[in-house]
């Protein structure tokens, strides 16, 4: 990539999470993966009621607490303590994944190493270490009605993470619906990838330069709206 | 004679676990959901060549001491002391740092079968329920499908996943009675009720033993029929070493704290915080 693009400002983790949270509609049941996605539970758009599910057997938990201030028996999938909320409930692991696999989740948000043009997801094998952790990611990718990926647009070395074909082991084929990155929002459609939004200061052409496959630039493509 | 599944000590509870046993270990990954004292007792007994079935391979006691957990040992006590021959596990390594399990894996000192978390839960549940297996969609089109029978049901492709039965299941519950009825606390339920009854012998470590009849029958999560032994944690927590030596744990905790503080600040700034 060009030097000029390398130095350009990108959205930070909280802003990416904030953008992800805008996708949560009133009444949605949402699972948030470890990393940027987990932050999104703190940014539910005002006036919407959203129920969060976590693999470790809980529905309806609240925002994260400061470390040390929460109940260790009330944590999200990343082990962060969260607030108790009216309506929340607990269950065992088989029930938790019946919810996931059985199609009862509206949205799953997770991180990724690569997403392909067709929406193939690679997010469990750590590329540089050749080991990995499947965890709940495969079940979520197979089970959720809508899958949103939140990730950096490029690797530390500037290589695109949105690629023609994934070179890393797949978590699931053709499962991603929307990609929110630190410079863009990209929809996976039957026509191909559609660039919907760009970060402030970025042009669609610049985003394309850092993206593997050719994207369709939505005629309505605009700057990422955060509120 | 009254039924009494209560045993007096953790060492007594695990006395018949032998070398090479298949052990299901409950919990999610957080130490408060794990059968911490039972794991320590298994370590003390000195058994080796174990096959373990668990969600993670542990994080190490320092991570949990920093959080103030009174019983800080997790799966890592069996990992770092090289007691495991084969691990059936869903989340064996950390993206953030190289854990002890990954070190053993690189050294060729442990075999691994990595299983999607929901499939792990269902394979264990299948053993408990006396099923010969379950058809699962998860893993189609990935390395997970390798060597497995496929079947199309109602137009969708599934993999046949076989049951995982343990010799022993070690689980942690909040309260238990002498019949083995159990209740849990919050998100520390996770794999514990799923694993109860999926082994020849299920041993429940509980925070508190209560009189028969004290647990509300409407609220009992694990019926005593699945449980063979119940052992209580000591009332007073053992003294903890104050010094934390695990640099990775310290660094990771500091990083998490900074991110949570920043996130809360930003949510407040936008009027999205409710506390």
Image: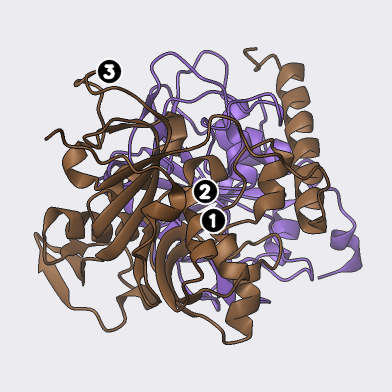
Chain colours: A purple, B brown
Image position of B204 (left or right of A118):
left
Residue in the picture at 69% in, 37% down: B67
- In which quadrant will I find the N terminus of chain B? top left
Question: Which image quadrant: the C terminus of chain B?
Answer: top right
Residue at 62% in and 61% down: B94
Left/right of residue B24 with respect to residue B74 in the rendered view: left
| Residue A198 visible in the current orientation | no
Disc nearer the start of the sequence (1/3): 1
Q: Look at the numbered disc 1 and give the secondary structure of its residue.
A: helix
Between A50 and A23, which is closer to the camera in this rendering? A50
Query: Relative to B214, does residue B172 appear above or below in the rendering?
Result: below
Residue farthest to the bottom?
Answer: B108
Tag 3 near tag 2, CB within 8 Å? no
Mark 1 vs 2: CB contact within 8 A: yes
Residue bearing mark 3: B214
Image location of residue B121, percent across then percent down:
31, 54
Give residue A4's quadrant in the image.
Answer: bottom right
Seen from the viewer's position, the closer of residues A4 and A68 is A68
Above or below, A82 against A100 in this view is above
Q: Where is residue A73 in the image (x, y as percent from the top left)?
A: 52, 31
Q: x and y percent of residue A221 in the render?
A: 61, 43
Please name the residue that numbered disc 1 is placed on. Answer: B40
Which numbered dot is residue B36?
A: 2
Dot 3: element: loop
């Amino acid at each position: 990539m060009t030097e000029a693009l390398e130095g350009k400002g990108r959205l930070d983790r909280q802003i990416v999470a904030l953008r992800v949270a805008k996708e949560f509609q009133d009444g949605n049941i949402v699972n948030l993966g470890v990393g940027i996605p987990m932050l999104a539970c703190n940014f539910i758009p005002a006036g919407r009621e959203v129920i969060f599910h976590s693999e470790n057997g809980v529905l309806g938990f609240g925002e994260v607490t400061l470390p040390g201030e929460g109940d260790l028996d009330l944590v999200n999938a990343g082990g962060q303590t969260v607030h108790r909320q009216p309506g929340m409930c607990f269950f065992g692991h088989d029930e938790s994944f019946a919810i996931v696999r059985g199609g009862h989740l509206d949205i799953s948000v997770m991180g990724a190493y690569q997403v392909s043009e067709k929406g193939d997801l690679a997010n469990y094998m750590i590329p540089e270490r050749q080991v990995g952790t499947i965890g709940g990611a495969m079940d979520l990718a197979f089970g959720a009605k809508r899958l949103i990926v939140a990730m950096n647009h490029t690797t530390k070395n500037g290589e695109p993470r949105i690629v023609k074909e994934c070179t890393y082991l797949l978590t699931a084929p053709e499962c991603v619906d929307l990609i929110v990155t630190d410079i863009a929002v990209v929809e996976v459609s039957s026509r191909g990838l559609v660039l919907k939004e760009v970060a402030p200061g970025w042009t669609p052409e610049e985003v394309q330069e850092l993206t593997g496959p050719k994207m369709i630039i939505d005629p309505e493509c605009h700057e990422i709206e955060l509120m | 004679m009254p039924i009494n599944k209560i045993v007096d000590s953790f060492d007594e509870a695990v006395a018949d676990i032998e070398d090479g046993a298949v052990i299901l270990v409950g919990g999610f990954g957080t130490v408060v959901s794990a059968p911490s004292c039972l794991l320590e007792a298994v370590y003390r007994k000195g058994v080796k060549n174990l096959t373990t079935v668990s969600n993670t391979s542990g994080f190490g006691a320092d991570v949990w001491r920093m959080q103030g957990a009174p019983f800080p040992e997790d799966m890592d006590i069996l990992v770092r002391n090289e007691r495991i021959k084969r691990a059936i596990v869903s989340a064996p390594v950390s993206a953030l740092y190289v854990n002890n399990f990954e070190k053993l894996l690189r050294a060729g000192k442990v075999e691994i079968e990595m299983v999607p978390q929901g499939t792990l839960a269902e394979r264990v549940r299948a053993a408990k329920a006396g099923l010969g297996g379950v058809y699962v969609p998860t893993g189609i089109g990935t390395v997970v499908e390798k060597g497995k029978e496929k079947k199309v049901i109602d137009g969708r492709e599934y993999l046949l996943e076989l049951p995982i039965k343990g010799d022993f299941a070690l689980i942690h519950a909040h309260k238990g009675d002498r019949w083995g009825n159990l209740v849990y606390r919050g998100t520390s339920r996770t794999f514990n009720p799923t694993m109860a009854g999926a082994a020849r012998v299920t041993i429940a470590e509980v925070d508190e033993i209560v009189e028969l009849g004290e647990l509300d029958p409407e609220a009992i999560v694990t019926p005593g029929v699945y449980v063979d032994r119940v052992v209580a944690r000591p009332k007073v927590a053992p003294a903890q070493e104050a010094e934390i030596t695990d640099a990775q744990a310290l660094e990771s905790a500091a990083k998490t704290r900074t991110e949570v503080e920043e996130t809360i600040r930003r949510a407040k700034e936008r009027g999205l915080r409710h506390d």
